[in-house]
Amino acid sequence: MAVGAEELASSVAVGDHLCYIPDSREAGVAWGVAFAKAGLENRERCCYVVGETPPARLVRAFSDAGVAVKQLIDAGQLLIMTGDEFGQDGDQFDPEQMLAALREFVAEAQQQGYAGVRLVGEMTWALRHVIPLKLLMELEATINPLYLSIPLTGLCIYESGKFPEKTLMDVIKTHPFVVLHEQLVRNVEFIPPEEYLGTASAAQVLRRQLRKIGDTPGAGGADRRILGASPEIRQVLEIIDRVAPTGSSVLISGDTGTGKELVAQAIHDRSPRRNQPFIKVNCAALPEDLLELELFGHERGAFTDAYEQRPGRFELADGGTLMLDEVGEMSPKMQVKLLRALQEREFERVGGTKPIKVDIRVLALTNQDLLSPRRRPAFRRDLYYRLNVIAMEIPPLRERPDDIPVLAKAFVARACERIPRRIEGIDDDAMDLLQQYDWPGNVRELENAIERAVVLTRNGHLAAADFAFLRPGDQPSPLASLNEVEAKHIATVLRLVDGNRTKAADVLGIHRDTLYRKLRQYGIEQPNARGRGNGRERQRAAVAVVS
């Protein structure tokens, strides 16, 4: 089985529709078996449609992966089918009939007590049955809404040398998720079914293009998925799957760098609103008056220089999801206005009198205890309960060390692609060091540490010496207060980025104004030019250590 295939396949969520374009049949079988095995372990019924792979060869692959294949086939949980059994030939192929058959298949599986259906298709079966490729792509497009409405998860394997390049481009456009460079990524090239089939309005097409610009990896990291194998992260994924189909507000809490925004994105991606806007607002990035304009927009002439009407984020999110990051930084005055907008589902633009109704789902993010008696000023309890219909807490990385190998391997692959470098892997000693470190900056700190090691190493693999900068002395005492932990971590990050406050704010996942406020609050000296020079000396020392 391909290295990492099982780990990555286990991160697939119910309702995902993936494509994989391997260079060889063997690579496709490895991923297909890993994908099916994850579903079998989740008590899903699995149907594997073979193309050119002999069924006996596939049975051996399942056995090699530790699957009790004969027992599962006899029980009816695992079905290995040929194209003859699965589909119709040539011009008789009807996408609508195929969708109806899948609905019936899933309903039957649920009646038999299965959690859902996991479908693996070696798409060369369509070539063997002379299925028109245009009809095949129509099926791939129209099946996407089905994945959102029933517990169906699918992987379509298109071997690169078997299909025309134009077909493979259409494959990418019709799948929300792709397996790429041994990673599972959200596909920014995905086109919603109505647009692919030519039934979308011009407004829908424009909205998707604008969203795509905001979702490119350089702009927001939309290529990232929630990775992990620990019970804690599996519970997070399970909660995501349960709450995503609802319209309820969710309060996502957790330390800085734990991945709260990724969780919010995953909830939106798995919801019925997934093809509608996902609008983000950082409540700590703007002062009170500007935050009001950002949220609610303004009318022409509402203030000096307001030469035209401007919609706010509430209006832009209509029909979709509004993510409020660092909601605990919102002033009491803005809390009142937000509460009214959430209660009434309507608001007025600044300078306006006409109520504007919206249909939005709100996801609020915070790294604070909003009801702490020490908060000054206190957070409004009525707003808290309005946001906290469903509560999710993302555990810090130090509480789930089992996730570190999965995350570290993914971050190495990502760093090598971006830099570029060729790194074969991480030594056992280095992995032990990573799992023993406390990670006060959580997943974000781990990713930055991996990238730094990839940049500075002179070897083809990462050893413990490449992480010498992770000194135990950098970690706070177990009995330190939260303020002491935060102050020490901010100072550490500033030192590691040579005093660059813009980069430090990015690493910490906070706005630069928030960083300045915390520097003043904790009395942390902001490094000057001489400090930055000392930082470069430290970096040269680190290079010497790993040379």
Image (tube, rainbow, N blue to C red):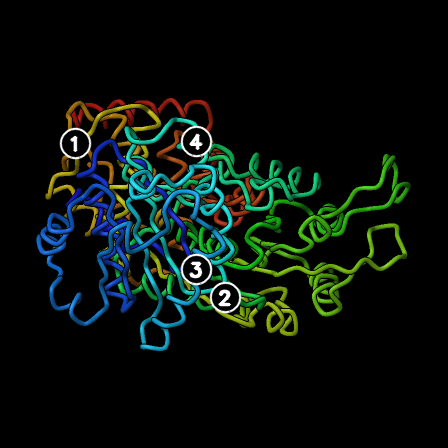
Residue 337 in the image, given as x and y percentages of width and height: 75, 62
How dense is the environment of label 3, judged by Cα within 10 Å: few (below 14), some, or many (20 and up)?
A: some
Q: Mark 1 or mark 3, which has the lower sequence index?
A: 3
Secondary structure state at the residue bearing disc 3: strand
On the image, numbered disc 4 is attached to which residue? Answer: 169
Which secondary structure, mark 2?
A: loop
According to the image, label 3 marks what residue? 254
Task: State which tag comes first along the sequence, 2 or 1.
Answer: 2
Tell which tag, 4 or 1, sits nearer the viewer.
4
Q: Residue at x 34, y 63 (%)?
A: 117
Circle nearer the viewer, 2 or 1: 1
Give the residue pinned by disc 2.
369
Whole-number angstrom distance, CA of label 2 to CA of label 4: 47 Å
The crowding category of the residue bearing disc 4, from other C-alpha atoms within 10 Å (few below 14, some 14 to 19, many at least 20), is: few
Q: Position of residue 508 (x, y in %)?
A: 44, 44
* Pick the front one: 247 or 92: 92
Q: Is residue 224 left or right of residue 413?
A: right
Q: Nearer the viewer, residue 251 or 275?
A: 275
Q: Residue type at mark 4: give it.
A: Met
Q: Could you say where residue 297 lies in the image, as x and y percent from the top left?
A: 77, 47
- Type of amino acid at the residue the image marks with label 1: Glu
Distance from disc 4 to disc 1, alpha carbons, whole Å, reads 30 Å
Q: Earlier in the sequence, mark 2 or mark 4?
A: 4
Whichever of callouts 2 and 3 sits on the residue coming sooner in the sequence is: 3
Q: Is residue 204 above or below residue 146?
A: above
